[in-house]
Amino acid sequence: MEVKVIRYMFFLDPSDGRNLRFKETAPYEPPCDHSICGCTKEVAVRPEGEPVGTRQQVVLSQTLKDNCTVEMVFEGDTIWVTFQFPMSRPSEKDPERKIDHAYFHFSPHKCTVEITGTGEGFVDCSFAHLYFGNEVDTSRFFNGHSPSRPAFGGVDLKDIRPEDVWVHYCKWGHEAYEIFKGPSVNIWNNIYRMAKSLGDTIAEMNVLTSSVGDVRDFILSRQNGYSEPLVNWLFQPLVIYLAWFVPADEYLRSALSSYANAVEHRADGNYHLEMASKKEAYMAAKIEKVNCDA
């Protein structure tokens, strides 16, 4: 397992107000000048004065078998887990893609999954939105702008227990969800607990008051009861569990894939039912108008 600590410091360019980003890393990587986007430029020399903002990430990475790699990026209370692996077959929907990936994005009470190479969707990619327990914020489900609506297939948290794992999908104002049953409940609760434990451990050590080198040294030096780095001891089981869902064929054989497809089709069906109902109402109104005109 490799450990990297990255500190991003942001400054304002006094000449044009553009954002300047200076990066410190451990292990050391030479900084360079390059444009990140239209409003932000990374600079090789730290600007004078105090930064207007600072972000810090801890990155754990490892090469697995069959040319598969895994990387975990920790920042605040979120974890981005990325597996990259060789494509098992060319993608007709995304012919320019050269490698497949699987993303697992953990945040409080939630994990969003994205896996390429499944043949599903418009871009050869599958998605799943998992939730854990009944403390989920359902007020901003529709791309962050609207609450879930229990009367229309949405989530009523009173029907969900603290130990439940469930998936949710929304489309064009329609939604559906399903609570897991069977072994998948324990599997995903274990995955979430492992991710949270690792994230909490990293957060305790990922402080801004120490240098990035000292933060990295502390992460590597803190041990469990078996003279092993604590972070590695927490990292390896999480990798093993998540690797069950890659590559794409393994994901398609999982219960998660079945649940995710079921709620997507149910929400999609609700959408088409409403469209059909609106068309029927439109045609009925046209016929009534013709009859009135006659």
Image (cartoon, rainbow, N blue to C red):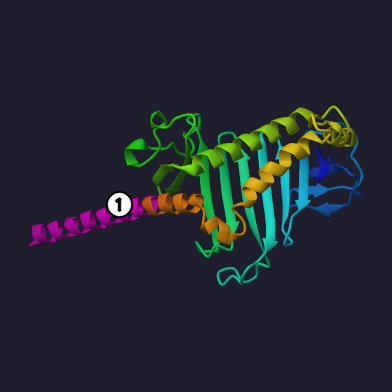
Query: Residue placed farthest to the left in the image?
Result: 294
Q: Residue at x 75, y 38 (%)?
A: 233
Whether residue 184 sits left or right of residue 84 in the image: it is left
Q: Residue 99: where, in percent of width, then height?
A: 68, 64
Residue 280 highlighted magenta (yes or no): yes
Query: Residue placed farthest to the front in the image?
Result: 226
Q: Residue 58: where, in percent of width, then height?
A: 78, 40
Q: Residue at x 55, y 34 (%)?
A: 109
Q: Residue 93: where, in percent of width, then height?
A: 55, 69
The residue beneath circle 1 is 274
Kindly identify the amino acid type of the residue bearing the numbered disc 1. Answer: Glu
Q: Residue at x 57, y 42 (%)?
A: 111
Q: Residue 121: where, in percent of width, then height?
A: 50, 61
Residue 181 highlighted magenta (yes or no): no
Look at the image and give the residue range highlighted in magenta.
267-294
Can I make out residue 55 in this image? no
Instruction: Provide the secondary structure element on which disc 1 rests.
Output: helix
Can I make out residue 279 in this image? yes
Please name the predominant secondary structure of the magenta segment in the image.
Answer: helix
Whether residue 57 sits left or right of residue 161 in the image: it is right
Q: Quick one: 227 or 113, which is closer to the camera? A: 227
Q: Quick one: 66 or 174, which is closer to the camera? A: 66
